Image (cartoon, coloured by chain):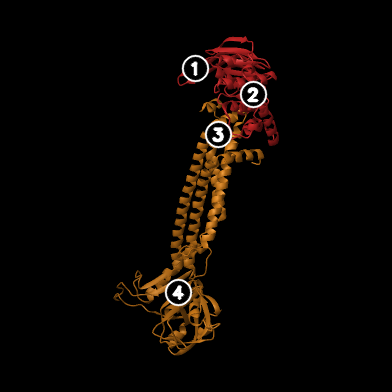
Chain colours: A orange, B red
Amino acid sequence: MFDLERWQEIFDTIRKNKLRTFLTGVSVASGIFILVILLGFGQGMRNGIAREFEQDASTSVWVWPGTTTKEYKGLNPGRRIQLRNENFDTWTALNGERIEYNSARNFVNGVSVTYGNEALVYGVQGVHPDFQFIDNAKMSEGRFLNYSDHVNTAKVIVIGNKIKKDVFAHLDSPIGEYVDISGIPFKIVGVFKEMREREEEQMYIPITTVQRVFNGGDRISNMAFTLPPVEDFDQAVTQAVAFKEELRGYLSQAHTIHPEDESAMQVWSALEEAKRYYSLTGNIKLFFWFVGICTIIAGVVGVSNIMLIVVRERTREIGIRKALGARPWSIVGMILHEAVFITAFSGFFGLILSMALLEVVGPNIEVDYVLNPSVDLRVALTTVFVLILAGTLAGFFPAWRAANIQVINALRDE
Amino acid sequence: MIQIKDLHKSYRMGSNSLHVLKGINFSVKEGELVAIMGSSGSGKSTLLNILGMLDVADSGEYILDGIPIKNLNETKAANYRNKFLGFIFQSFNLINYKTALENVALPLYYQGVGRKERQAKAMKYLEQVGLREWSHHVPSELSGGQKQRVAIARAMVAEPKVLLADELTGALDSKTSYEVMDLIQKINDQGNTILVVTHEDDIAHMCKRIVHLRDGVIVEDKEIEQVRASQYVQ
């Protein structure tokens, strides 16, 4: 390996056989290049999907009432289901230790929102203080609604960052400003940020205020819960599914809904959804690996093919070298040394090229479900070494045969 | 230098067996210049290959400089070839992407001689065959006679005990042939042992001894009056 004479011999050969060397190199480099790009995009899709689910807390379970579609206990289908405070309070009281955060939500409709003379066309929702954590909202200024706001039916409001940019751009901070909802002033106490701008076009006020001031009674539009995080993903999914089914059971009973009437009471678990996507990305990753490995195999076959041709082409030269006193192992060594050098060099070249491409282009890719495609350096290095090893192995047999050819036959070969 | 006793060799061709050498006995002393003659199929090339350890005899004894050549593995054969023998071929067998100098230096590479020393020594032998100015040319830029002289320099560079030449003038015109033979005679004058396989009478008569092979046996072995090639060369 560190035999300087051998290196000089190798470089001589490479320098004088440029095309052959180039072709071998290209086949190896492109194999690695394709594999790394594929793996990079596999990872990119995983990242992208993970981001899609980050916008809400990953263990959240949501309940949306709908309209019954099945006749049950003498009640006709087509009945609208309305959730009430009692549902929320009872379920929370029964399952206190299984729930991390909980919030009911009430959409405020038919009200006019103004700031000074300006009419604001953003959604207003009444929520519990915990909603911040369920929705994964990050406070950029001020605070979210708190327990004191909740019990005191305070006239305070939290706005999205987009609203701040649209309406309060002329101010350093919108905190302390007032917006009027149906003529009632609400004091801005906080600004929140979300993953997506669309979700920043919301304003939150305490749900107690909505129910008291805007004639909400004890009605709620939907409810959301998060479960305490569990290390093991599968266990978390199992827990979420059990919770979801029990919740549906309770609500179906409370509202006299057919237990299999899915559209009357929709219960949705982020984890369950996530699992579906994760297994999808898992499959995609598997597929990419499969394609990648096929590419590597093609590369290895290409290398060994070229090795065969090289040995064939050099039969006479090998014969001469043997007549001059070359030992069989020095012939094998020479051919393999050259092969390993070329595969390693072009393998790393392909690796560096593809990683540079991912590094430069990756962060700029703005497609749904693909985020920052990148590849684990260890995985990439491993593939390069696998390729080198496989190339060596593939090159060994023709080299060994070459080393053992009869000199007379080799020299007679015109 | 070379002692051969009852050497047999046959080749298997499918179901037929071709008995090529049928009991060869002869010996060569140091400093001899021997021509091995015979028509094609007489077994002369086979004999040379066995002498050169490129092929193995079926039975018989072969002693080279007191060392019995027997049951050699590839590595040992390679070592002996490298130390004891220099080859000159009809078709020159130079490596076409290496310069004349690199070609000549190659046997020394396999002896593990350092690069500097290799080149100096190779240059010395190139000078001896009169090709100093051509040292950095590749074979395709050389004439046939020049190529054969490079090959002779390459055979000489490892300072072998015996030079084996297989039809070394077969690819050359007669004028060039005589030039090459002149060189061979001069090398022989320095005391080197040389075996020349040829089917050309005039070349054979430039040696000191002629061994005639026919159908795998030696039919004639005589010492002759050497014809000096220099008289044909200006």
Q: Are marks 3 and 1 on the same chain?
A: no
Residue located at (55% from left, 37% from top) = A396
B165 with respect to A157 (left or right): right
The reply to whether dot 2 and dot 4 touch (C-beta < 8 Å) is: no
Cα–Cα span, label 3 and label 1? 29 Å
Q: Which mark is residue B85?
A: 2
> Disc 2 residue type?
Leu
Nearer-the-camera pick, A342 or B145: B145
> Disc 3 residue type?
Trp
Q: Select label 2 or label 3 by which is in front.
A: 2
Q: Give the class, few, some or many, for how many residues have Cα within 10 Å of label 1's Cα (few <14, many ≥20).
A: few
Cα–Cα span, label 1 and label 2? 28 Å
The reply to whether dot 4 and dot 3 touch (C-beta < 8 Å) is: no
Q: Give the class, few, some or many, for how many residues have Cα within 10 Å of label 4's Cα (few <14, many ≥20).
A: few
Badge 4 sits on which subunit? A
Provide residue B15's location: percent of width, then percent of height. 45, 19
In what element is the residue under mark 2?
strand
Provide residue B37's location: percent of width, then percent of height. 56, 14
Cα–Cα span, label 2 and label 4? 88 Å
Q: Which mark is residue B43?
A: none
Q: Which mark is residue A400?
A: 3
In what element is the residue under mark 1?
strand
Q: Which residue is mark 1?
A: B18
Badge 1 sits on which subunit? B
Q: Which residue is mark 4?
A: A198
Q: Give the class, few, some or many, for how many residues have Cα within 10 Å of label 3's Cα (few <14, many ≥20).
A: some
Q: Select label 1 or label 2 by which is in front.
A: 2
Looking at the image, residue B85 lies above or below residue A218: above
